[in-house]
Image: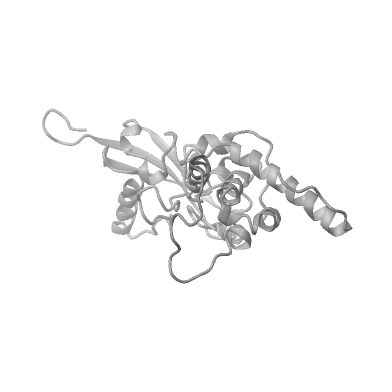
Amino acid sequence: MVQDNGKEITLALKLRVWRQRRGQPGAFEEHSLAAVPTSASFLEMMDMLNEQLIKAGKDTFAFDHDCREGICGMCSMTINGMPHGPIPGVTTCQLHMRNFRNGETITVEPWRARAFPVLKDLAVDRSGFDKVIQSGGFITVRTGSAPEANSIPVPKVIADEAMDAAECIGCGACVASCKNGSAMLFVGAKINHLNILPQGQAERDRRTLSMVKTMDEAGFGNCTNYGECQAHCPKSISLDVIAKLNRDYLRARVKEFFSSTGKPSKGGD
């Protein structure tokens, strides 16, 4: 966006940014930036703030980032009360300052969830997600040379559904937006991605039971269908994955019950 005189439009902003050390109480700090380009991303604006703090000899704000292309899911910030900010379908690094008004006060916080303790300032510990993936986010395949791509035919409708679920980048916005701190959207996406593919059938039941168990042990809350997770997911993962997770979990528990009692089960979906 360019003004008539050829200069880029800039904004004067007031910032309320959360400052906290791990295990200690936190509080907001107020800062001002005089000339933020409207073309800058939100993370670039945070870089500008940190550069200003460095020049003043003050401690910078810690925040997570990596690819800055909406792929890695690291840029976990709550902006004006909304994970990833006010624009749907984008991550914090894809949010640009042209979406804010001149003179506006912007409040920046970390993810707010019991299962995501604050490490420092805006950076949180999301290792709970790692534990869930480690418990079942894999398939048993022969390692070595790459198999022929068409050796296991996958119907297009199944491949498309698996790819939709695989879009989840594990950012944690679903947990941060949920009143219960539930990770059901994340876990549902990861389970559905593998459970519907032919390659994932060998571990389907064990994967489902193990990942749900690990999710509960990590301290995530229960799903009560508020729908905030879907609304704030930067990849627009649908609540359908939660319904399919519940289906697969019930299926696995029934099979587990009959297996423990020695009674035959009909199996199937």
Which corner quadrant of the image does residue 202 belong to? bottom right
In the figure, is residue 39 to the left or right of 267?
A: left
**Which of the two residues, 145 or 45, is positioned nearer the viewer here?**
145
The residue positioned farthest toward the left in the image shown: 5
In the figure, is residue 236 to the left or right of 115?
A: left
**Which of the two residues, 182 or 189, is positioned nearer the viewer here?**
189
In the figure, is residue 93 to the left or right of 118?
A: left
Which corner quadrant of the image does residue 63 belong to? bottom left
Q: Is residue 117 visible?
A: no
Q: Position of residue 219 (x, y in %)?
A: 68, 54
**Which of the two residues, 159 or 180, is positioned nearer the viewer here?**
159
- Residue drawn at x 21%, y 33% is 1
Image quarter in which the C terminus is found: top right
Type of colouring = one colour
The residue positioned farthest toward the bottom in the image shown: 144
Q: Position of residue 85 (x, y in %)?
A: 44, 38
Q: How many marks?
A: 0
In the figure, is residue 131 to the left or right of 247?
A: left
The residue positioned farthest toward the top in the image shown: 4
Q: Position of residue 20 (x, y in %)?
A: 52, 55
Q: Position of residue 232 (x, y in %)?
A: 51, 37
- Residue drawn at x 16%, y 30% is 3
Q: Is residue 252 visible?
A: yes
**Which of the two residues, 113 or 154, is positioned nearer the viewer here?**
154
